[in-house]
């Protein structure tokens, strides 16, 4: 799995929001590279511009300076801050929503989604509605909806922020394993240091606004068994201390 | 189920039934009091009418083949104006949602029209549209449509931004966002607006019939008061009461969730 194929490069990204209230200088000269199979976490104080970076990569934000280059033509899946399931659609309809919108409801794609639902224990609920699912199941469903059109890169914007601490741990474990299982490259935004270390091989630390890159850490843990187990690695606390010192605190 | 739970459920059931029984008895009691007071001439039944007289009037109307004709007239006018109000206000709300510039331009006009007592326009409508069913329907639409547009449009613009963003990540067009997020997530708002519309339309139709008509419940009430036949007036009001309740529950029935 040690491929080092570059899949995405972000160069000298800057972003200013103009509003009636004034200018918000949001990003300033952000550059980083993403390799196939990477799990990169972007961490920084809230409001520094993390979501903005993902929005630009996803093509939702067109006014910016700098370059975002994909080395090959690849689909991007974006998992938003909340699961945003549609409560008027069934579990299966929710999972197929992206395909329906993109007009890609082919037999092959539908079968793929059904196989994902089966694999990740949601198939038996395919005709129920999201309100009947647990927090973790909702998150898995949102992830399957994102995986449905087989994106190579996944963007995850604080995917666990709506969950309580206990489910947060187990859901992050679920999500991590699904992403690794399906061989996806992931860029996740987080403001949780422990979560970042336990999930990623690279952590990009941003300063407070306007966000600049303070440091990029390569994470190498002696344990590689998913977010919960990884926390037991002996290097964990070293990384933690390092990052804790580095991150700007909102005070 | 545990014993305690069974006991609890039973208690709740009895409580609910008690409320219903009290409601029905209260109704019967008031009707009886009304009847008795007018029988004993404590109240003047020439002015207040009485339950018995209302029933008599209903029977007379029915025998003269007038009862269902008047109900039909009012019902027809109400349903036509309700349908038109619903369709037009949905279309206008969609346009306002789609064209931000338009909605900003129209906003003060909507507020002014919304706060104005539309009944005042009655005489003009009759002159412009005519003293006929078209005038009555216009009246009803005018009374209901502004509020209808405002509440549907407000629902639209309060749609969950994250759900819209989600569709944007799927590269959805504005039309698809409207059809897949904005309208379905406002189903509740739209249904509630329909409930308001149906009663507003009924109000508008009766207003219209007061102003100009040869038929309908509004006509019945107005005619009754002109010839000082309070039985007819009360009967009209009674029919109206029943009609509005039926319309309201029909609407609930039609819009009920299937799952
Ligand atoms: N559409 C927008 N218009 C104006 N300002 C915005 C917009 N989106 C975000 N911002 C501002 O840019 C800054 C960074 O936002 P965001 O990327 O959401 O931060 P983060 O995800 O790190 O919390 C914030 O101060 C926010 O108020
Ligand atoms: Mg954010």
Image (cartoon, helix red, strand yellow):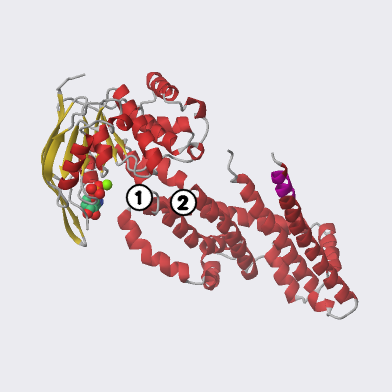
Image coords of residue A223 (percent x, y): 25, 26
Say whether residue A194 is left or right of residue A166: left
Q: Is residue A97 above or below residue B93?
A: above
Image coords of residue B168 (percent x, y): 31, 40
Local packing at callout 1 (Cα closer than 10 Å; few below 14, some 14-19, many 20+) is some
Task: Give, as a single range, the part of the protein colored magenta.
Answer: B4-10
Q: Residue at x 53, y 61 (%)?
A: B144
Image coords of residue A238 (percent x, y): 18, 37
Local SS, label 2: helix
Pointer 1: what residue?
Answer: B98
Main SS type for the magenta part? helix
Local SS, label 1: helix
Q: Are marks 2 and 1 on the same chain?
A: yes
How far is disc 2 from disc 1 in space, using C-alphas?
A: 12 Å
Q: Is residue B173 visible?
A: no
Q: Is residue B133 magenta?
A: no
The C terminus of chain A is located in which quarter? bottom left
Pointer 2: what residue?
Answer: B90
Dot 1: chain letter: B
Q: Residue at x 73, y 47 (%)?
A: B7
């Amino acid at each position: 799995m040690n491929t080092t194929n570059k899949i995405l490069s972000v160069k000298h990204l800057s972003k200013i929001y103009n509003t009636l209230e004034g200018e918000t200088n949001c990003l300033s000269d952000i550059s980083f590279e993403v390799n196939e199979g990477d799990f990169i976490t972007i961490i920084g104080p809230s409001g520094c511009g993390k979501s903005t970076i993902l929005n630009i990569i996803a093509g939702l934000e067109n006014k910016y300076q700098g370059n975002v280059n994909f080395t090959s033509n690849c689909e991007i899946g974006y998992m938003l801050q909340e699961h945003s399931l549609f409560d008027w659609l069934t579990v299966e309809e929710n999972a197929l929503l992206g395909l329906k919108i993109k007009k890609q409801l082919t037999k092959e794609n539908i079968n793929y989604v059904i196989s994902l639902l089966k694999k990740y224990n949601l198939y038996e609920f395919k005709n129920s509605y999201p309100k009947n699912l647990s927090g973790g199941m909702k998150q898995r469903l949102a992830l399957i909806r994102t995986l449905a059109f087989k994106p190579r890169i996944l963007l995850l914007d604080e995917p666990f922020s709506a969950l309580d601490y206990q489910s947060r741990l187990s859901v992050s474990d679920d999500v991590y394993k699904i992403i690794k299982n399906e061989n996806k490259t992931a860029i996740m935004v987080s403001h949780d240091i422990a979560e970042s270390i336990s999930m990623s091989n690279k952590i990009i630390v941003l300063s407070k606004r306007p966000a600049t890159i303070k440091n990029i850490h390569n994470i190498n843990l002696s344990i590689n068994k998913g977010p919960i187990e990884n926390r037991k690695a002996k290097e964990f606390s070293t990384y933690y201390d390092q990052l804790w010192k580095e991150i700007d605190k909102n005070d | 189920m545990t014993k305690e739970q069974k006991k609890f459920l039973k208690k709740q059931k009895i409580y609910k039934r008690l409320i219903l029984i009290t409601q029905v008895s209260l109704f019967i009691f008031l009707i009886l009091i009304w009847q008795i007071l007018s029988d004993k001439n404590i109240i003047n039944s020439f002015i207040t009418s009485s339950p018995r007289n209302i029933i008599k009037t209903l029977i007379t109307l029915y025998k003269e083949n007038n009862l269902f004709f008047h109900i039909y007239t009012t019902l027809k006018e109400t349903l036509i104006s309700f349908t038109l109000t619903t369709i037009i206000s949905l279309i206008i709300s969609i346009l306002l949602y789609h064209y931000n510039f338009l909605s900003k331009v129209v906003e003060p006009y909507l507020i002014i029209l919304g706060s104005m007592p539309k009944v005042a326009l009655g005489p003009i409508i009759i002159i412009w549209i005519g003293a006929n069913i078209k005038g009555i329907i216009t009246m009803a639409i005018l009374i209901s449509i502004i509020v209808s547009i405002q509440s549907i449009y407000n629902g639209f613009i309060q749609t969950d931004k994250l759900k819209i963003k989600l569709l944007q990540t799927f590269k959805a067009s504005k039309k698809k966002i409207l059809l897949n997020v904005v309208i379905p997530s406002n189903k509740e708002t739209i249904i509630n607006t329909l409930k308001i519309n149906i009663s507003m339309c009924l109000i508008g139709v009766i207003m219209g019939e007061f102003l100009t008509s040869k038929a309908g419940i509004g006509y019945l009430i107005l005619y009754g008061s002109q010839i000082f036949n309070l039985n007819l007036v009360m009967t009209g009001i009674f029919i109206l009461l029943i009609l509005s309740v039926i319309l309201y529950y029909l609407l609930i029935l039609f819009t009920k969730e299937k799952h």
